[in-house]
Image (tube, rainbow, N blue to C red):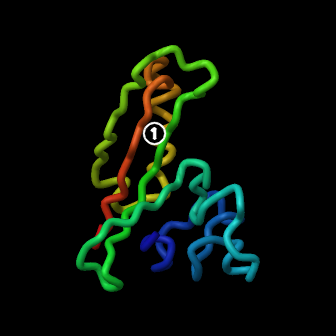
Amino acid sequence: TGLVQSGGRQPRNREYISRTHCCRACENGQGHNRDWWCAGTPSAMFREVEFPGRGPKGKLVAHYIIHEPDWSTCEVTPTPALLFLHGANTFNWPETLHQEVRSLVRENPRAKDFVIIAPFATKGE
């Protein structure tokens, strides 16, 4: 985040957070970790979708975090969906968004049977 990049407060998990790149693996020239998206977001929860539009390449790209129920045990039909609209903390530190969604599922047992979509609110998306 900008705070880490600008030399502000140092994160406790310095082995994962880079001060010069999006993540420590990229800083070391290893490319993105296949299990974790940059800044520690699990890749299984990270998605990208393209929309036709007026973006720089003729399309708009949006990113989001998703929680899917365990489809083998989910008994709710049709499966409910929740659009998780988040606040300023996750706008400033988007790498915390997956933690917010996981916390919701952990603290609310009914939420585990929902499809939860949390869009990133970054400029241009």
Front-most of residues 17 and 70: 70
Q: Residue at x 37, y 69 (%)?
A: 61
Front-most of residues 62 and 53: 53
Q: Residue at x 55, y 48 (%)?
A: 45
Residue 121 lies, in percent from the top left, at 31, 60
Relative to 107, does residue 2 appear above or below in the rendering? below
In this picture, residue 37 sits left or right of residue 7: right
Q: Residue at x 59, y 65 (%)?
A: 38
For disc 1, the marked residue is 101
Front-most of residues 57 and 87: 57
Residue 3 lies, in percent from the top left, at 44, 71
Relative to 19, does residue 90 appear above or below in the rendering? above
Residue 18 lies, in percent from the top left, at 62, 74
Relative to 88, does residue 3 appear above or below in the rendering? below
**Outermost residue to the left:** 54
Q: Amino acid at mark 1?
A: Val
Q: Residue at x 57, y 55 (%)?
A: 41
Per the image, label 1 sits on a secondary structure element best described as: helix
Q: Quadrant of the C terminus?
A: bottom left
Residue 64 lies, in percent from the top left, at 42, 54
